[in-house]
Image (cartoon, rainbow, N blue to C red):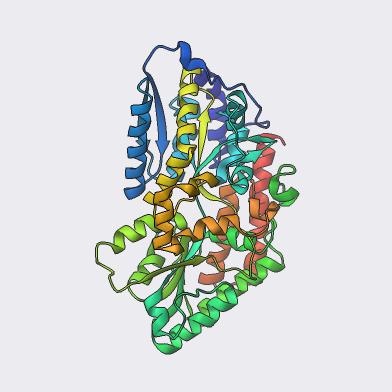
Amino acid sequence: MRSTALRLAGVGAVIAAMAIVPVGAAGAGGGPVCPVHALDKAKKPVEITFWHSHARSNEEVLESLVDQFEAANPDIDVKLVNQTTYPDTLDKYRAGLSTGDLPDVVQMEETVVQSLVDSKSTVPIGACAKADKYPLDDFLPRAIEYFTLDGQLQAMPWTISNPILYYDKALFRKAGLDPEKPPATLDEVREYSQKIVDSGAAPHGIALPARDYLNEFFYAKAGQEYVNHGNGRKSRATKALLDNKTGRAVWTWWKDMEDSGLLLNTGTNRESIDHLLAMGNGDAAMTIEASGGLGPVFDVLSTGQYDHVEPGVGPMPSLKPGGGVPVGDGALWMAKASSPEKKAAAWKLVKFFSEPAQQAAFAIGSKGGYIPIRRSALDDPALQALWAENPALRVPYDQLESGPTNAATVGSVIGDYQGVRDAVAEGLTRMFAEGVSPKQALAGAQKQADAAIQAYNDRLGV
């Protein structure tokens, strides 16, 4: 492990000089052999380190599952390290390429696929599946396709989610709306919001953060790719596809909603929960947030602090009916720097987390917020009972399974993903805070995103 880390030190130094968020190194990911049987002759026990970023009830589920894994595999010890957030995890991983302080398994968000492949620091999960003759046909195709690049499954989709509509059924009733029929399109969001405000049910129809990631899902549900070259999957992305008919329609809706007072803009802060608090405080009847928040949201509601809220869940509204969404949230990556026996142990842990029973457990523990990546997980009696008791909690799963599977809904792969998100965030800020028109703001975001993509590719020499 130490010698491999030293070989990676040069890569880490280059990354630090780049001063960009993603991990980067020239070249595409390869297909190294995964030593899935290296545990057979290893000195026991084998300790592996797992970095994650789960909080509250989701972390409790994880700890319980790790206890089960260790009980079933007494020769493997799992050291859990909570890195708090995805950006913190990526920063720590990037630093570890220089210091050698790398995990054996790491949970990363969906935006890092291209940059981690470029780093050449991971073992593709597909190599382990091939070496172990591990079938993937039971997995949700869109989840597998998202984390597939260069013809190889790079990471195992794990705790995945997608954005959904959260709404207050009580306020819907007060406004004369059907509480079992949430809006399906952005036009319907406007219509519902007008009724909510006109009735006095709430000061605003919807509270919405000016989040860069929401923009990606608005585009995907409209069938619009986010970057060129098949969303970066046919070949490396070289240009963003932000400034187009779809983008202008979404941003114009967004700005008009705020200008009319129907939408409460809660800003661009990625850590803020003001949009959720706005619902809790009765300032708005709807918001959009990742389904992974269902567990924490229901935990807060169970305290009685917001007992006036009757939570409802619906698919994310879009420009037009239908459409599909890519996956969001966490996948499991394995580090190439680990010793063969640690790789074998890590693969065993990845397989354990991917089994139907464990996938069902995470779905149940997160109140349906994390989506089972195995279709056979739906046969779990406890998960069936959860969805039968509250069918709305099945919405995230059904949303991921619905709609066409194409380049737009599989999702984009971008080297400097954060650079593109920063460009979108700045464009939204200019539109909302500086009075720039949606057309001008979007054109500026396009230019900045293109520059970020090009700068990343230039640094890699590709």
Q: Residue 164, how many percent across, how many down? A: 50, 62
Q: Is residue 246 left or right of residue 139?
A: right
Residue 142 versus residue 430 in the image, above or below:
above
Q: Is residue 162 left or right of residue 303?
A: right
Determine the image quadrant of residue 76. top left
The front one of 122 and 255 is 122
Q: Residue at x 66, y 66 (%)?
A: 247
Q: Residue 448, how many percent across, how many down? A: 64, 55
Q: Residue at x 65, y 55 (%)?
A: 409
Q: Residue at x 41, y 63 (%)?
A: 390
Q: Give the quarter of the figure containing the C terminus.
A: top right
- Count of marks placed on residues: 0
Q: Residue 324, how many percent across, how many down? A: 62, 59
Q: Residue at x 67, y 32 (%)?
A: 28
Q: Residue 171, how many percent across, how many down? A: 39, 79
- On the question of residue 271 being in view, the answer is no
Residue 137 versus residue 290 in the image, above or below:
above
Residue 445 versus residue 1 in the image, above or below:
below
Residue at the far bottom: name it: 198
- On the question of residue 245 being in view, the answer is yes
Determine the image quadrant of residue 336. top right
Residue 406 versus residue 190 in the image, above or below:
above
